[in-house]
Image (cartoon, rainbow, N blue to C red):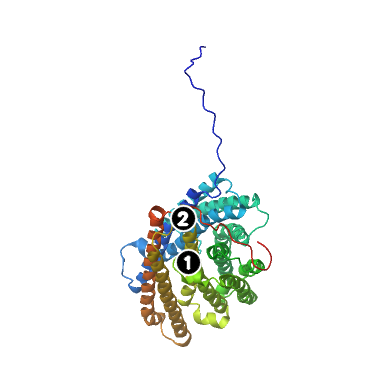
Amino acid sequence: MSHDPHDKPAPLPVPEGPRPLVDTRYVMAWFAFSLFWVVWGPVLGLLAATKLDDPELLAGIHWLQFGRLRIAHVNAVIFGFFSTAIFGFMSYAVPKLCQRPLTNMRAAWWGLAIFNGAVFVGEGCLLTGRLQAFEAGEFPFIVDVLIALSVAIMTWVMLDTVVKRKTERIYVSIYYWTAGMLWTVLNFLLGAFVFPFVLGGANSAASHGFYLHNVVGLWITPMGLGLVYYVLPVATRARLYSHKMSLIGFWALAFFYPLNGIHHYIHSPIAEWAQTIAIAASMMLIVPVWAFSINVWGTMRGQWKQFTGPGNYALKFLVLGAVWYLITCFQGPTQALRGMQALTHFGDYNVGHAHSAVFGAFSIWSMAGIYYVMQRLTGRSLWSNRLGSWHYWLEIIGFTLMFVSLSIAGFVQGKRLLTANDMWITTVNDIKDFWLARTIGGTLMDVGLALYVFNMVMTCFLGKKESEPEFPVQAPKPAMSGGEV
């Protein structure tokens, strides 16, 4: 074969450079889904609240009736709004803390696709009346299978990254996140595939209390606390106050939280000794709560100028969530007391408490995480500090109005039911004005959330480019006392 002297030799293959520490596209994909669910979930809640004010509203549309709206709202907030934000934040923070990229990125993308696809299908099923009668486990069986699969995939990806880390020590956020994911895989399998099918009567109620409370205590709580422990030191550029205190809080949460699910069923046919253990465990939750709070306020010592100054909305929302976390964790244990539960159990006081936990603390923290990460991944400053301020104050005013009105309504209902022989409908008539106030508060909250979503989208595309694409602070600094990170 002749050789053409004009032929050029084939270029040598160019070796690929090292993978970036954080996969920006992957993190932003999780955040994009979270921004969608931020709108979807609360809008369903607002429609449900409005239906209480005017039961005839949308009366001819079966899939927009209160029962379906309420269930779809709860699942959209837990599995959509909060969980997608947490998966996205972990996909940013775990590589930073482990000093290596996430492993098994193909599996990670499958986890993202399966999880969000399952939640989309699940929401459609709930609104069309296809569900299981198990609170926070209402998705149909096939949807539960997909969610369990996707959470297992994400757990594998995160744990594999931690095992193959290039750092010697493990920061406390990793403790919370890895434990929370392992706990949730086990809890979800029990709640979706075991408890609804093998137990009945009082035993079913006890198992339901275990599952439902662990969705909050062993998924939402550790994932949210891990986020705060990451963002707070880097947002203030201060050292974490105490690493030992954070570990005391972690182990206290692990030990006490699984024991208190039955405190939802005081004065029930469930064995008295089991109720007493749940009450005692609920009171002991003061240990992890105060350990966390001491760390937050200790880290903030000398840093309040950053909180009160313009911008830094990650820090503002972290502190706001920490305040509501304290309020929530005062309510929870006191509600478990027999006398208090007799007054509050069948009223709206519990509804206010549930919202103060899932929204007031943990959803607020998830938004703080996105405020922090979004600017660093895009290399852009926040598009509008004014919209950030509106978002902040609308959440404060709107949620305070909602929480206070529901709490007062709950006391009014409880007092009526304990001391009067009137029919139940009289308690509804007594609290109509409080329900209206709750709807107004919810409207303000939803307006704030819409501004937040708009601001995040505009930041991605039109925020001012920073001279330094990755902001200076990368990971939390070691603790000031109590050992090293």
Q: Position of residue 400 (x, y in %)?
A: 43, 75
x and y percentages locating residue 239 in the rendered image? 60, 65
Q: Label 2: which residue?
A: 31
In the image, what residue type sits under mark 1? Ile
x and y, in percent, of residue 204 in the image: 56, 66
On screen, 322 above or below 178? below
**Residue that sits furthest to the front in the current view:** 467
Quarter occupied by the C terminus: bottom right
Residue 314, percent across and down? 48, 64
290 left or right of 55 in image: right
Q: In which quarter of the view is residue 124 placed? A: bottom left
For residue 460, side relative to residue 225 (left or right): left
Label 2 secondary element: helix
How crowded is the residue under tag 1: few (<14 C-alpha within 10 Å), some, or many (20+)? many
Q: Residue furthest top?
A: 1
Which image quarter: residue 67?
A: bottom left
N-term mark: 1 or 2: 2
Residue beneath disc 1: 364
Tell me which residue sits at (48%, 19%) in the image: 7
Q: Secondary structure at mark 1?
A: helix
